[in-house]
Image (cartoon, helix red, strand yellow):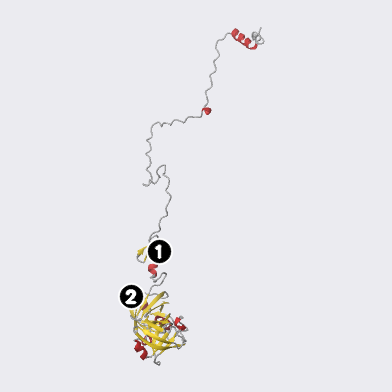
Amino acid sequence: MISGILDFIVNDLPDRTVHMTTDCAYGDDNPLSAIEDGTELTFTYGRQSVEARIRLRSGGECFHGSFEMGEALARRLGLPAGRRYKLTYAPDDKTMTIVAAPVSSVRASLTHGPKLGSRVLSIGYGLMSKLGLPESGARQGSEITVRHGSSSSKLRVATPSNLFDGGLRLHPSAAGALGLKAGVPYTWTYDQRARALVVGGTASRRAGGGDRDAMDAADAKKRSGGSAVDGGRAAAPPAATPRAPAAAPRQASKSGAASRPAARPKPKPSAKPRRAPAAAADARSVRRPAAAKPAAPADRPIAAVRASAGRKTGRAVPPPSIYMPKGRV
C-alpha cells in the first residue's frame, strides 16, 4: 500500500475520470506517482464508492500535488472541493481510499511589511500551497484567524504578484499585537476546518516542539543546579555513588560534626605536670656507676711506704736524699 496527500479540485472532466498530479517541480516527492496511467480503480470515501480511471498529468510549475474529478462524480462520493485529503492505494484490491487531512504545517520566518494594511497577512504562493490555503480564497481576500499563544487576530489573506515569492509578511503593529518577532522562524499550522492559522514555538528540540523561552529557562535551571520538568514529572536527581566505610577517627575533627565521635575532654592543667614513668631501657645500654677508689691514708709513715715499695720491686729502696738548696751549707 502506498499513500500521499493531495488537494482536491472539482473541474470540468468526463464522467468516471480522475486526473492526478503528483510530480510537482517545486513540491515534495509523492509516492502516488508510482500508479500507472490508465489504471481503473474503485474510489472510496466514507461509505460511498465509485469506479473511475486514473489519468496522470504533468505537474509543471506547481508546489503541491492534486487530484481532480467532475462535479457529478464528486457529488456521488460526497467529496467537498477545496480540501486536502490523504489517498491510500492498495494495488492488490485496486482500491483508492480517501480520508480527510485538513491540518498542514510549515516552518517559516516572519517579515515586517510596513506598506501592508494592519489587518492583512501576505503569504507567498508556495507557502500557501504547502499550508493548504485555497487559492480562490486568497484571491477573494477571505479572512482567517491567526493565533499565537493567548493572542488572536482575524486577518485577510493576500498573495504577492510574484509566483516564487515564498515569504510571509505582516504589518509591524499586527505582528506586535500577536507577539511575533520579525526574522524569527516559527511553525505555522493551518486547519482547514476551523480556518485557523496557529503559530507555534520558535524551536522544536524534542518531539512536539515547544516554546523557546520555556526550554531556555529549563536549560538555565539545569545549569544552575535546579531540576527541569519534562512531561509534567520532575527529573530525578542522579543517584549518589556509594562510598566505602571510612575508619573510625582517633579523635573528633575540628568542625565537630555530629556524625563523628565526640572529642575527649582535655585534663585540667596542674601546677606541676607529672611525667609518665619511662619504659625500662635495655640492660646493655644502662651505664653502671664506676667504683669509688679507696682514698690514700692521710698520715702514713715514711718507713712503711719504703717497706711497701721494696716488697713490690724486690729491691731495697734507698733512703730519700735530703734536698739542699744551692748556695747553702
Taking the spot 62% from the left edge, 10% from the top edge, the residue there is 311
- Residue 171 image-quadrant placement: bottom left
Return the residue at label 1. Answer: 220
The disc placed on residue 134 is: none
Taking the spot 33% from the left edge, 75% from the top edge, the residue there is 151
- Residue 195 image-quadrant placement: bottom left
Indicate the amino acid at tag 1: Ala
273 on left or right of 320: left
Q: Is residue 109 visible?
A: no
- Secondary structure beneath dot 1 equals helix
How many numbered dots are placed on residues in this image? 2
- Residue 232 image-quadrant placement: bottom left
Q: Is residue 149 above or below residue 304?
A: below
Return the residue at label 2. Answer: 151
The image shows residue 95 at horizontal and vertical percentages of 40, 84
Indicate the amino acid at tag 2: Ser
Residue extending furthest toward the front? 92
